[in-house]
Image (cartoon, rainbow, N blue to C red):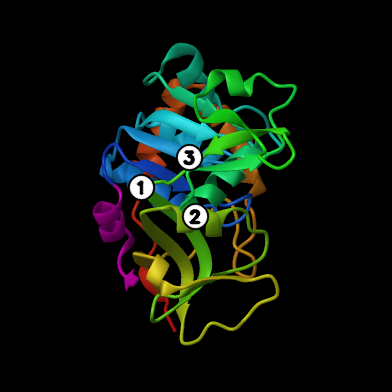
Amino acid sequence: MADIRSLHDAVADLIHDGDTLAMEGFTHLIPYAAAHEVVRQGITDLTLARMTPDVIYDQLIGAGLVKKLIFSWGGNPGVGSLHRFRDAVENGWPRPLELDEHSHAGMANRYVAGASRLPFAVLRGYRGSDLATRTDTVSSVTCPFTGEELAAVAALNPDVTVIHAQQADHDGNVQLWGLTGVQKEAALAADRVLVTVEEIVDELTPRPGGVVLPTWVIDAVAVVPGGAHPSYATGYTVRDNAFYQAWDPIARDRGTFAQWLDTHVRTDTVRTEGAGVR
């Protein structure tokens, strides 16, 4: 059952040094506030999992908290490279970064297998690429019915999944809607789940295409209005395109990045929690 807690306390209790941490959200509902709290608390030696490790993971990698990345496509959407990610891979700064790279379909199926508590998932994929030769989490199986050879991907079960959503009720049930990705699967695959939300409401009103996560799959809910910025939350906030453009020159230079991190994350305070409860 989910407890409604402060973001500081939820992160401190649920995310530990050495964890495999998934912070999911596709363009929309990306849990930046929670990632920044991880930076402030200095939680390190993390293995990060994400289908699209964009700016949120560039920040965590640049902060020196990440030892391994499990991912499919990585980049600054609409802008270009992730320079802190690239610096870690090419130069080992601020620390070497181990990679486990997959296709989008492979990552999604890994979460599905994890959520289903199966050891692996089967798909038609990875043909024509060398990804399978560079990871021990892709193999092949022969279908016992048709004899077809298929790709098999190992289940992904994060220690912790963190997502952002629009609403939770007072019992800790959560609803998200709009452009969703693999948040549901990543949450169901994890041992522990933290959800930051825009607000607490008395009752969750069904939304077209909405996803409801029941309280019994969630460990903690933290009220953090604007917690997805610079991404967005449909019905609440809009995408800060200017930030994504500004990130490119910030992240290119190690010193500029370090100054940004100290000024905007390490010394920042979390938005007033409790605003957005009704």
> Can you tell which mark lies on residue 115?
2
Q: Residue at x 60, y 23 (%)?
A: 132
Tag 3: amino acid? Ala
> Can you tell which mark lies on residue 159?
1
Q: CA distance from mark 2 to mark 3?
A: 15 Å
Asked if residue 24 can be seen in this view, the reply is no
Q: What residue is shown with label 3?
A: 49
Q: CA distance from mark 1 to mark 2?
A: 12 Å
Q: Secondary structure at mark 2?
A: helix
Q: Residue at x 67, y 64 (%)?
A: 178
Asked if residue 263 can be seen in this view, the reply is yes
Q: Residue at x 35, y 28 (%)?
A: 64
Closer to us: mark 2 or mark 3?
2
Query: What segment carries the magenta color?
Result: 1-15
Q: Position of residue 60 (x, y in %)?
A: 42, 36
Badge 2 local density, few (<14 within 10 Å), some, or many (20+)? some
Pick whichever of labels 1 and 2 is earlier in the sequence: 2
Q: Position of residue 198 (x, y in %)?
A: 49, 69
Q: Any magenta on residue 236?
A: no
Badge 1 local density, few (<14 within 10 Å), some, or many (20+)? some
Tag 1: amino acid? Asp
Taking 160 as reference, is 134 above or below it? Answer: above
Q: Position of residue 181 (x, y in %)?
A: 62, 54
Tag 2: amino acid? Ala
Can you tell which quarter of the image residue 151 is in? top right
- Judged left or right of residue 1, residue 22 is right
Taking 263 as reference, is 88 above or below it? Answer: above
Pick whichever of labels 2 and 3 is earlier in the sequence: 3
Q: Residue at x 47, y 67 (%)?
A: 197
State how many labels appear.
3
Q: Any magenta on residue 12?
A: yes
